[in-house]
Image: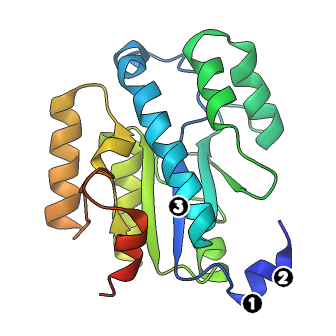
Amino acid sequence: MDDARIEDGAAGDAALLIVDMINDLAFPGAEDLVAQIEGVADVILKLREAADRQGVPVVYVNDNFGQWHSERSRLVEHCRRKKGPGARLAEKLAPRDDDYFVIKPQVSGFYATNLPVLLPKLGASRVILTGVAADICILFTAADAHMREYDLWIPADATAANSPQRKSWALEIMQQALSAETRPTVDLALSDWLAVRR
């Protein structure tokens, strides 16, 4: 991406974060996510298209799968080689050349990453959090964003967890404790959320 876009703040005051959706789905409990994840990916794609129309930058925040020498293209290729749902997900949601890509070593997108530096450079004071898992990486990233005073929208239909109960529990915590908006995209359009100033 052109660094001038970062410097001049042309991206506005929001950023769309796509968390752990470049995913090989090769971990215990992943099978519980598979049933939900393709629908979630479709919602995220629509949000990404809306973000493009609104000039909102897209930031992938992704686990490194223990590959400490890795980077964006290698992680995408790793998922594509796995075949199955992880490969389909990587094909559908692969980051584009102009998307940002942050590799995280732990559950929060803010922990030991450049995200705390990148978001201010983008001029973002508001964050849309999407991806998996709502009760782990989304929750921890949301908590760190809240502590940094970012306004949050975590669309319920753009997240997944290992069970509906865990997702519901996490969304309730984020709504009540972190002041996050959690209405799904069918009830709240990106343009409408952007129009609201807190």
Instruction: Look at the image and tell me in which quarter the N terminus lies.
Output: bottom right
Q: Residue at x 33, y 87 (%)?
A: 197
Q: Position of residue 100 (x, y in %)?
A: 71, 58
The answer to which of marks 3 and 2 sits earlier in the sequence is 2
| Amino acid, disc 1 | Asp
The circle drawn on residue 8 is 1
Query: What's the distance in space between the residues labelled 1 and 3, CA to CA?
Result: 18 Å
Q: Position of residue 12 (x, y in %)?
A: 58, 82
User: On screen, 38 above or below 122?
Assistant: above
The circle drawn on residue 16 is 3
Q: Is residue 71 visible in the rendered structure shown here?
A: no
Query: What's the distance in space between the residues labelled 1 and 2, CA to CA?
Result: 6 Å
| Amino acid, disc 2 | Ala
- Residue at the disc numbered 2: 4
User: On screen, 162 above or below 42?
Assistant: above
Lateral position of residue 92 relative to residue 74, left or right? left
Q: Position of residue 127 (x, y in %)?
A: 45, 68
Question: Is the residue under label 2 in contact with that under label 3 (CB below 8 Å)?
Answer: no
User: On screen, 110 above or below 185?
Assistant: below
Instruction: Look at the image and tell me in which quarter the C terminus lies.
Output: bottom left
Callout 1: 10 Å neighbours few (<14), some, many (20+)?
few
Q: Residue at x 81, y 33 (%)?
A: 74
| Amino acid, disc 3 | Leu
In the picture, residue 182 is in which quadrant? bottom left
Question: Is the residue under label 2 in contact with that under label 1 (CB below 8 Å)?
Answer: yes
Query: What's the distance in space between the residues labelled 3 and 2, CA to CA?
Result: 19 Å
Circle 3: element type: strand
Q: Residue at x 17, y 41 (%)?
A: 168
In the picture, residue 191 is in which quadrant? bottom left
